[in-house]
Amino acid sequence: MNMALMHILFIAIVISTANAKEGDFPSLDCKAENLGQYGQQSLLECVIKNPKEDTSILMVSWKKGSRTLLLFRNGAIQLQEPGFLFAQASWNASNMNVSLLITNTAVAHQGRYKCDVMTNNSPPPTELIKISLKVTAKYSKPTLTLKTDGTLTCASNGGYPEGQLRWSNERSAKLPNDPQTQATQTNSGLFQLSSKLVVGKESSVSDFTCSVFNASGGREEESQFQVKDEPKTEEQRKELDTATKIVAPVVVIGSLIAGLLLALLIYRRRSQNNRRPSTTPLMRGHVGVPTSDEVMMEEGDDKYPDNTA
């Protein structure tokens, strides 16, 4: 009887203790997956749930790998790396929000973090929670440049994780021979993307589009480029050269004929002006024109010859 009673009492104690741990003691609740934007603030959320009225935090530790970023112990902050702090500026030991704030997110901040919290409740729960941060950065609008050798270059910078450039034209959503994307990672961890498309003079397409896609496959930006109309084939270029050889002499001969006609017209007008009689009235005493008295004297001389002869 005594042994049976002892077993019953033991089971009751275990059950009550388990119920007390699940419902009465504080627990740390954190968001396992967090997303941060490059150059912006990032928040790793952790909150102590089910605290008692007298619950007080004895220790909070935030780590990334073996590196301690933020440490609160013995009522004060013992260690704090630049750019890492509690999410609430007025945080203290009675504040159950122990979230970590990253003030200026960089690619290097991506990874797994550990949060360790201890309170004054008995038995004091000590929990080690693993949290991850994923960092993203948006790519710039692609820039397109056409080189003299007929190569069209597309470039986009400042993105993360590694993305991809894709080409398309007015005929197809994607080119059958889609050029490869060259990715270069800078010191900041961001990527520079570039891709080259050989347009050449044989292409029958004039409009090209370069789009940048992020690591998740989403289109972020795109740019278009219009190639100037040029002869596309060798036959078309020969036809254009032949037409140029024919048209050029015709233009020259036409210009010469027009010049000759204009000169002839001017000559004829001048000749007509020279042949036209003068409309200026004869003036007495005009040089070369005899006056009436001179006419009468000449006539008198004829009628009355000199008798002295």
Image (cartoon, helix red, strand yellow):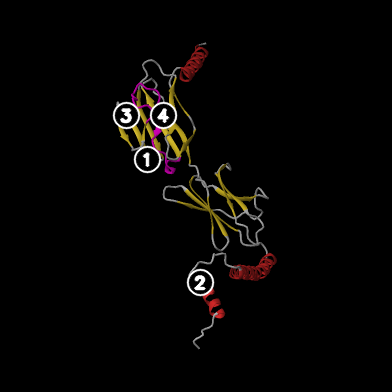
x and y, in percent, of residue 273 in the image: 59, 68
Instruction: Report the amino acid beneath label 3.
Output: Arg
Q: Earlier in the sequence, mark 4 or mark 2?
A: 4
Density class for disc 1 (Cα within 10 Å; few <14, some 14-19, many ≥20) is few
Q: Secondary structure at mark 4?
A: loop
x and y, in percent, of residue 302 in the image: 56, 80
Principal SS element in the magenta part?
loop
Disc 3 versus disc 4: distance between alpha carbons?
A: 16 Å
- Label 4 belongs to which residue? 99
- Label 1 belongs to which residue? 67
Q: Secondary structure at mark 2?
A: helix
- Label 2 belongs to which residue? 293
Q: How many labels, in total? A: 4
Up the image or down, 305 lies above or below 139; here it is: below
Instruction: Report the amino acid beneath label 4.
Output: Ser
Which residue is rendered at x = 41% and y = 50% of the image? 187
Can the viewer see residue 193?
A: yes
Density class for disc 3 (Cα within 10 Å; few <14, some 14-19, many ≥20) is some
Disc 4 versus disc 2: distance between alpha carbons?
A: 136 Å
Instruction: Report the amino acid beneath label 1.
Output: Arg
Disc 1 versus disc 4: distance between alpha carbons?
A: 17 Å
